[in-house]
Amino acid sequence: MRRELQQTADGSHTLFIPEMDEHYHSVNGAVQESRHVFIEAGLHHQAKKDITVFEIGFGTGLNAFLTLLDAEENNRTVNYYSIELYPLEPQLVQALNYGEVICPGKKELFSALHAAPWNEPANITGHFTLHKIQGDNNSCELPGGIDLVYFDAFAPDKQPEMWNQEIFNNLYVHMAEGGILTTYCAKGVVRRMMQEAGYSVERIPGPPGKREMLRAMK
């Protein structure tokens, strides 16, 4: 699967997959989108000090990096699980500019996220433990007591197998009471699947270039 490096409106990179006609992050601003959808609408709405995060789609590692930096800044302990079926090639990881754009003084932490082994825990900092899972979300074993889900799969029309009732049911069962799920997607069919699983779902303002997004709570 060929992936092309592209610069977005806020100066940060995204990756483009020509055969899918799909981007990893918004062309309106990759960092801006991730901060809005996952950090501000998700992480900052979870009141627990020590949390377990489950991310669908490790991808570029941008969401993990922003979460790590936030945990360091706010003295939170994050146990971070992320699943990815197609990890990036090392040369692509090295080309991504998130370390320089977000926090030049800590860009080695971005590299550490990608250098961490797959399928075993890695203590990146005293506040952040990473569990990268190489596999398919439809068949992997989920951790229990999830406090926050970053649902960052490719769009439903590009990757429909990642947006199904069974996935949302399974996530709901493995989440703690008060757990939060955020996604950039605002499609009615996705909202109805979340509601069917048991979530309370709200439409909230989306990042630049997107009118709405979804936030769900158990």
Image: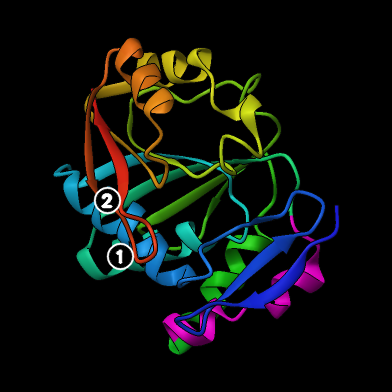
Earlier in the chain: of badge 1 and badge 2, it is: 2
Give how far across and how far down residue 34 sits, in percent: 41, 61
Q: In the figure, is residue 7 to the left or right of 54? A: right
- Compared across the picture, whether 38 is left or right of 48 comes to right
Q: In this view, does 202 lie above or below 211?
A: above
Callout count: 2
Q: Residue 43 carries which label?
A: 2
Task: Please tell me whether mark 1 or mark 2 is closer to you in this view.
Answer: 2
**Most frequent secondary structure within the magenta stretch:** helix
Residue at screen point 54% across, 61% down: 25
The C terminus: image quadrant? top left
Q: Tell me where residue 9 appears, x and y as whole percent.
A: 48, 80
The answer to whether one can see residue 68 in this image is no
Q: Looking at the picture, which amino acid does disc 1 mark?
A: Asp
Chain part drawn in magenta: 88-103
For label 1, the SS is helix
Q: Mark 1 points at which residue?
A: 70
Q: Where, by quadrant of the figure, is residue 71 drawn? A: bottom left
Coloring scheme of the render? Answer: rainbow
Q: Position of residue 176 (x, y in %)?
A: 27, 23
In the rendered image, residue 99 lying in the magenta stretch gets the answer: yes
Per the image, is 153 magenta? no
What is the three-letter code of the residue carrying label 2? Leu
Residue 102: image quadrant is: bottom left
- Visible residue check, residue 212: yes
Q: Write the residue at 56% across / 42% down.
A: 155
* Observer-nearest of 51 and 19: 19
Pointer 1 with pointer 2, Cβ within 8 A? yes
Q: Is residue 116 left or right of residue 56?
A: right
Within 10 Å of disc 1 (Cα), the crowding (few <14, some 14-19, many 20+) is some
Residue nearest the viewer, comparing 125 with 208 = 208
